[in-house]
Amino acid sequence: MINQKEWELMMAGKLYLPANVGDDSFERVHAAQQKFNASEFWCDDTALDELRKCFKRAPEDMQLTPPVYFDHGDRISFGRHFYANTDLTILDENGVTFGDNVFLAPHVSIYTAGHPIDAEIRNLDLEYAWPVTIGSDVWIGGNVVINPGVTIGSDVVIGSGSVVTRDIPDHCIAAGNPCRVIRAITPADHVRWKTQHQEYLNNIKQNL
């Protein structure tokens, strides 16, 4: 049975006591992800289909590579054409929303939960939870950590090993600890990669 007041505090980004929320989604998603992590996912989608039922939104074309870890699942909304490589971790005490065409490299961690800086209050087991939003057409490199309350825009590349502590705008490459904008994504980037794509098509055609 959900404690409505604790739930409202949690979803509002206020201090709350996790042990008092009384949410059964934890047990449900953990059972489903345990089966998925042990599955022959490359030839059988059954366990992934069961796991998808635990999420707020999970299009049929999403792909996950185990192992994965989710705290609740029912606060995560995946967009179309989502792919996550191995060891995705999402602590979804609050909402996590992905746009379309999001690619995650191995060992990406997304946290909505945080603890007070003050030790006296922290030791009372109180925490807060702030939502994370990731736009469309985003590639996030390996070993990236995304912290509570962050919004990452659309058409963004996050470099490997970054720790994202603040919002990242649209149309840029960002990296570092803390993560910061390195440069804009420009029309020259588009031309370069269109050229390489055409070279790829030509190479494939020559081998037919």
Image (cartoon, helix red, strand yellow):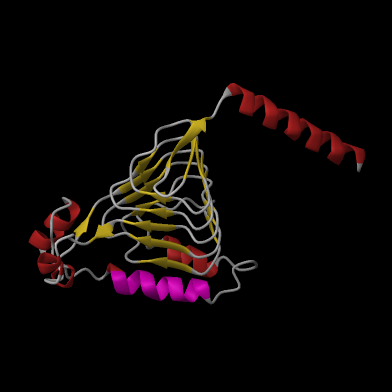
Q: Against 105, is 182 above or below?
A: above
Q: Magenta: predominant secondary structure element?
A: helix
Q: Is residue 133 left or right of residue 140?
A: left
| Magenta stretch bounds | 26-37
Q: Is residue 117 left or right of residue 76?
A: left
Say which of 71 and 56 sits in front.
71
Coordinates of residue 131 in the picture (x, y in percent): 28, 49
Q: Give the image quarter of residue 179.
A: top left
Is residue 28 highlighted in magenta? Answer: yes
Coordinates of residue 26 in the picture (x, y in percent): 30, 70
Q: Is residue 1 visible?
A: no
The quadrant of the image that shows the C terminus is top right
Q: Against 2, is 157 above or below?
A: above
Say which of 157 and 37 sits in front.
157
Coordinates of residue 18 in the picture (x, y in percent): 18, 68
> Which residue is found at the position 47% from the left and 58% from the top?
108
